[in-house]
Image: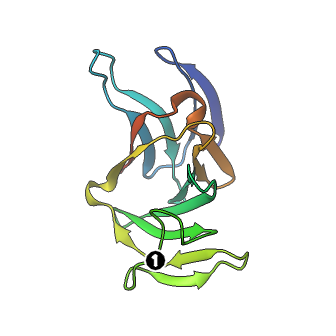
Amino acid sequence: MAGIAAFLVVGVGALFTAYDVLARPGPVLRVTIPAGTDGAPAEEILRIALGDDPTWEVRWRHSVAGIVVRDIFAWRDGQMLLTDTLTPQLDVAGLGHTPGRGELRDDGAGGYWIAEIDEPIVGNAYWIRIGSEAAPTRIAHGEREFDLSIAHASVRARIEVIAP
């Protein structure tokens, strides 16, 4: 029987939450902050064993419009993919649909769903800037959601999948 361990870890001047699903082999989603120019070491701030559900969402609030955008990712056959994006608006700076890149659909709640993007993420990793607490960045997997902004607002972070 798989168990879930949740714990708080105190890092160098930061408090962060991490969880891992035990006894479930498979790929691991990892979020790290790079080493600092001041000599601070790189820091892992989140680790999620993807197990039987190799999908996750990066949920972020647009800092100007205040809307929440959901970017959905999957791990398939050794490749990280951006599969879908859900947004309540398309007419906001930086958001929109490019013909030929996924299929634009109604999300059923008055917003937009760009489905079947299936765009490979080069190197199975990408960089983000974690939003402020007013425009938070969260990662969701299954029923769990992790707010990266609480302890790491405005910091560059690398999201990657580590295969077994």
- 108 horizontally vs 70: left or right: right
The residue sitting at 63% across, 34% down in the picture is 5
| Mark 1: amino acid | His
Q: Is residue 1 visible?
A: no
Quarter of the image where one finds residue 20: top right
Question: Where 42 sits versus 162, above or below?
Answer: above
Which residue, given by chain and number where applicable, does mark 1 sit on? 97
The residue sitting at 34% across, 50% down in the picture is 126
Q: Position of residue 73 (x, y in %)?
A: 47, 62
Q: Is residue 28 visible?
A: yes
Give the class, few, some or many, for how many residues have Cα within 10 Å of label 1's Cα (few <14, many ≥20).
Answer: some
Question: Where 1 sits versus 55, above or below?
Answer: above
The residue sitting at 56% across, 53% down in the picture is 62
Q: Position of residue 102 (x, y in %)?
A: 44, 80
94 and 112: which is toward the camera:
94
- 55 horizontally vs 82: left or right: right
**Color style of the picture:** rainbow
150 and 64: which is toward the camera:
64
Quarter of the image where one finds residue 146: top right
Quarter of the image where one finds residue 6: top right
For numbered disc 1, what is the local secondary structure?
loop
Question: Residue placed farthest to the right in the image?
Answer: 109
Q: How many badges with numbers are in the image?
A: 1
Q: Position of residue 22 (x, y in %)?
A: 57, 40
